[in-house]
Amino acid sequence: MAGVTHHVLSGLPLARSTVPRAAHLREVPHVVADALADPRTRVLAVRDGGLLLTDDGRVRWLDPASAGALIAAGDPDAGMPGPTSDAWLLLGEQDDGTRVLALRLPDQHPLTAGGEPADVLVHLSDGPAGPGGWASLRAVGASLDAHDAGLATAAVALDAWHDRHPRCPRCGAPTRVAQAGWSRVCDVDGSEHYPRTDPAVIMAVVDDADRLLLGHAAAWPAGRWSTLAGFVEAGESAEQAVRREVLEETGVLVGDVAYVGSQPWPFPASLMLGFRARATSTHVEVDGVEMADARWFTRDELTAAVDSGEVLLPGGASIARALVEQWWSRPGA
């Protein structure tokens, strides 16, 4: 199939990381301040789900001085955020003791491709300077290596959580950042709050003829098809969620459900639990609300549809794409 290759679920680009998160450092006093004072520290800039990249598509790693220049590029009057502000997140520590931080920039930060000032480029440590620019993690996740993909995923997830949870959910008071960016504390009622992760199921549904069930959501552009997915409801197991979602969206009954892998999906805060599910019925009747269409595909049919442009598969960074590729490459599995 054009554009489809064998894909191992354990190798999902957004599921890998080669840098320990170093949770034991989060309570160390002045850990972020010490990292910012160390020129070896690497900083990843994140803004509204996007990353700052080099001109060849890699993460543009900055040192602390570069990070300061990047802030000034957006607002010449802005000073360096204090180490206890929620602008800084401790992502981990490399084997050689180098700390890794994320710098959260405002969504309106004006730096764009070609607009990066020369003084930022001077401090780069990852090769020749280029114009670079911002790119969504969704778009570039599949092309990043394990080191950058894992850290970028954590940075994007934490950035989204801080952006959406500046106040205490119990009393409404403003909260302050704690644990080097991994929690927030309300000083009014003393409560602590941590990033939430919403479990969602995503499934490759196959029938006895080894056909794959794909759906076209009502909100998607024409031609986009993917595996079925949905959030786990309160009081429900993941396997129950698989059967319920498939039935609700397509009217297809599911019997056996087998777990195959997971992927963090920080858009903004999901953990995708991947399954292979065996259908016990094949009649399709979409709900017409979430799902506009759903079809069974043989391998030859899906190959032809992709090659002709009739079907656009999910992006390479997604577990949905991995599930499709796993089914396509393993007939009868």
Image: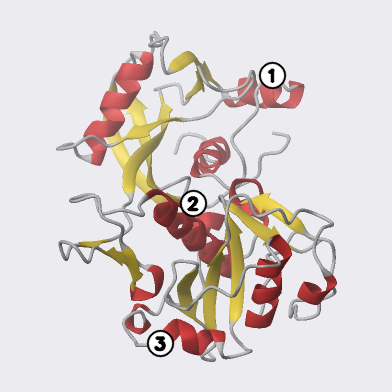
For mark 1, give the secondary structure: loop
- The answer to whether any part of residue 166 appears in the image is yes
282 or 262: nearer the viewer: 262
The percent position of residue 201, horizontal first and vertical second, equals 35, 38
Q: Could you tell me which residue is drawn at 30 percent across and 61 percent down?
A: 175
On residue 310, the disc is 1
Q: Amino acid at mark 1?
A: Glu
Q: Could you tell me which residue is drawn at 58 percent across and 91 percent down?
A: 38
Crowd rating for badge 2 (residues with CA inside 10 Å; few <14, some 14–19, many 20+): many
On residue 9, the disc is 2
Q: Amino acid at mark 3?
A: His
Query: Mark 2 or mark 1: which comes first in sequence?
Result: 2
Quarter of the image containing the C terminus? top left
273 or 3: nearer the viewer: 273
- On the picture, is 120 further left or further right than 37? right
For mark 3, give the secondary structure: loop
The percent position of residue 231, horizontal first and vertical second, equals 32, 35
- The answer to whether any part of residue 280 appears in the image is no
In the image, residue 108 sits, relative to residue 38, either above or below, namely above
Q: Amino acid at mark 2?
A: Leu
Q: Could you tell me which residue is drawn at 53 percent across and 74 percent down?
A: 101
The percent position of residue 314, horizontal first and vertical second, equals 59, 35
- On the picture, is 319 further left or further right than 302? left
On residue 30, the disc is 3
Q: Are marks 2 and 1 in contact (CB under 8 Å)?
A: no
